[in-house]
Amino acid sequence: MTNILEVKNLSKSFGGIIANNNISFEANSGEIIGIIGPNGAGKSTLFDLITGYTKPDTGGVKFNGQNILNLRPDLISSLGIGRTFQ
């Protein structure tokens, strides 16, 4: 399968609170991946990091081999990555 999303060692803290700590995963074409956890686990922060709404302290994000970490959210969306709320 073709790797379309690569998240490597993403970390984000707010003050002294660690929201995400070295999260890494890959999503391949045709896969469905679920992110689950209790309230406050960092799920929304992870999606904010991937979609450019929040900048990580460390780590990187690639979409179709392109580094998207420093792109604006609207440009990331135009590549085909978006989020939806419940």
Image (spheres, grey):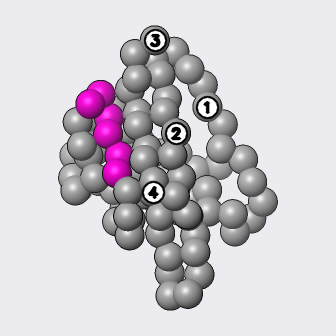
CA separation in Å, label 1 and label 4: 17 Å
Q: Which residue is mark 2?
A: 25
Residue 45 pos. (x, y %): 53, 62
Q: Main secondary structure of the magenta part?
A: strand
Tell me if residue 51 can be seen: no
Q: Any magenta on residue 38? A: no
Please provide the residue range marked out in magenta. Answer: 60-65
The Cα atoms of the two marked residues, 2 and 3, are separated by 15 Å
Camera-side mark, 1 or 4: 4
Q: Picture coordinates of residue 38 (x, y %)? A: 78, 60
How many numbered circles does the render carry? Answer: 4
Q: Which residue bears the numbered disc 4?
A: 10
- For label 1, the residue is 33
Disc 3 on helix, strand or loop?
Answer: loop
Asked whether 64 or 86 is in front, the reply is 64
Cα gap from disc 2 to disc 4, whole angstroms: 10 Å
